[in-house]
Image (spheres, rainbow, N blue to C red):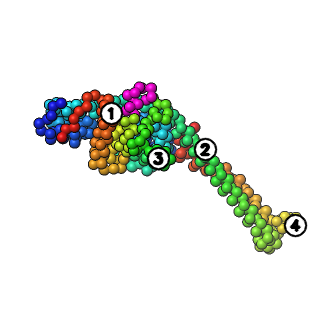
């Protein structure tokens, strides 16, 4: 093996080895190092060895499957989407339940301590007094709670489809993209 | 153009487009899997980490800022962090990939393509397996994926000087493992 007379160019090749192999050195330095390598058997052999090693590593067959990974990603996204829909459904039902319970509670409170039928009749103008006659006593007792419950029920009936559609739309639209 | 297209796809992904995610997957998964398999030395683990990286992308796409670097670097950074976490988890229960001892190449515990490619491929896998995961990541990104030093530093969140010194060390170490099979041995210049 020939020993170079001046070791510094050899050292420079070694110091810049990675960038030289990657072709990332500036042109003038690359030219100098290549000129040296063409004269120096040690550096020439060294560079050839590294190039061969990297070329073999690049050609190394790999076993991981991209198709398999994507099918797993899709499966996971689908599972997360189903879980999200389930949570939205639970939230919707919970909100409806809380609303119904509040309506019931108000009805019960009015039953016990709310304004009575008689108080209502007393406040009505005289021209309406004829309308209030003949109303059964049971209805008179339960008038306000019944009125409140009927109004609450009507309101719930009117708004629940809208509420349901709105919640479903807001839950499904942003994260649903084109996924099935 | 490609960079802008990636940024656009990530934006669509953040808005919930699964098609955008699939396109990003088609554009980047092959390279990422290749990097992860070389870094981890285990195709199964590489697939797991790749899957996790794309799910993370789906969930956190809104955190990508194109002014701070390319999408590819962002994705590779997330994936390499996940890979290091997996290795740390694994090393607490199994023998670490680092250190001398018994070699733990990809062919040692499961059938992989390399096993069918003859002794040469097996030898290369084993030589890679003797480097630390960090050095394998640096060597792979710098010389097999051919990325610039600055990008490798950004992906692995280390200094550029560290990339240069570690890639230099990894090249020498790899060569010392493979030297007897690579041709005529040579003298190290003074």
Callout 4 and callout 1 share a chain: no
What residue is disc 1 on?
Answer: B178
- In magenta, the rendered stretch is B114-125
Q: Secondary structure at mark 1?
A: helix
Callout 4 and callout 2 share a chain: yes
Of the residues tagged 2 and 3, which is closer to the observer? 3
Q: Secondary structure at mark 4?
A: helix
Pointers 1 and 3 in contact (C-beta within 8 Å)? no
Tell which subunit mark 2 falls on.
A
Is residue B145 located in the magenta-colored stretch of the structure?
Answer: no
Give the distance between the C-alpha atoms of the residues marked 2 and 1, in whole angstroms: 52 Å
Residue shown at 71%/53% (left/top)? A157
What residue is disc 2 on?
Answer: A82
Of the residues tagged 2 and 1, which is closer to the observer? 1
Image coordinates of residue B181 in percent, x first then y, are 32, 29
What residue is disc 4 on?
Answer: A137
Residue shown at 57%/41% (left/top)? A78
Pointers 2 and 3 in contact (C-beta within 8 Å)? no
Name the dominant secondary structure of the magenta segment: helix
Please rate how many residues cluster around mark 3, counting C-alpha atoms within 10 Å: few if below 14, some from 14 to 19, many from 20: few
Give the distance between the C-alpha atoms of the residues marked 1 and 3, in whole angstroms: 26 Å
| Label at residue B91 | 3
Please rate how many residues cluster around mark 4, counting C-alpha atoms within 10 Å: few if below 14, some from 14 to 19, many from 20: few
């Amino acid at each position: 093996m020939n020993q170079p007379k001046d070791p510094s160019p050899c050292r420079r090749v070694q110091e810049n080895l990675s960038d030289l192999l990657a072709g990332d050195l500036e042109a003038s330095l690359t030219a100098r190092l290549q000129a040296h390598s063409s004269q120096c058997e040690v550096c020439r052999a060294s560079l050839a060895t590294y190039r061969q090693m990297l070329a073999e590593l690049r050609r190394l067959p790999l076993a991981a499957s991209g198709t398999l990974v994507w099918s797993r990603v899709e499966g996971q996204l689908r599972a997360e989407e189903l879980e999200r829909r389930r949570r939205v459904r639970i939230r919707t039902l919970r909100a409806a339940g809380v609303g119904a319970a509040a309506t019931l509670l108000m009805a019960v409170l009015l039953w016990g301590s709310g304004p009575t039928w008689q108080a209502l009749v007393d406040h009505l103008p005289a021209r309406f007094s004829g309308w209030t006659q003949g109303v059964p006593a049971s209805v008179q007792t339960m008038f306000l709670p019944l009125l409140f419950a009927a109004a609450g029920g009507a309101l719930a009936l009117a708004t629940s489809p809208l509420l349901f559609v709105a919640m479903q739309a807001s839950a499904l639209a942003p994260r649903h993209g084109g996924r099935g | 153009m490609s960079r802008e297209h990636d940024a656009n796809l990530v934006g669509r992904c953040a808005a919930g487009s699964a098609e955008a995610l699939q396109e990003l997957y088609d554009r980047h998964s092959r390279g990422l899997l290749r990097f992860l398999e070389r870094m981890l030395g285990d195709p199964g683990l590489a697939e797991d980490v790749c899957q996790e990286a794309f799910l993370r992308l789906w969930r956190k796409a809104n955190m990508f800022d194109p002014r701070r670097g390319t999408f590819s670097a962002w994705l590779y950074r997330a994936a390499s962090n996940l890979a290091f976490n997996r290795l740390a988890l694994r090393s607490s229960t199994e023998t670490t990939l680092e250190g001398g001892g018994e070699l733990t190449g990809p062919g040692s515990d499961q059938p992989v393509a390399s096993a069918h490619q003859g002794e040469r491929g097996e030898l290369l896998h084993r030589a890679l397996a003797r480097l630390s995961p960090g050095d394998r990541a640096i060597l792979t990104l710098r010389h097999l994926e051919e990325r610039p030093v600055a990008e490798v530093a950004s992906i692995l969140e280390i200094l550029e000087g560290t990339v240069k010194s570690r890639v230099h060390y990894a090249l020498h170490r790899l060569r010392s493992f493979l030297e007897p099979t690579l041709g005529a041995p040579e003298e190290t210049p003074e």
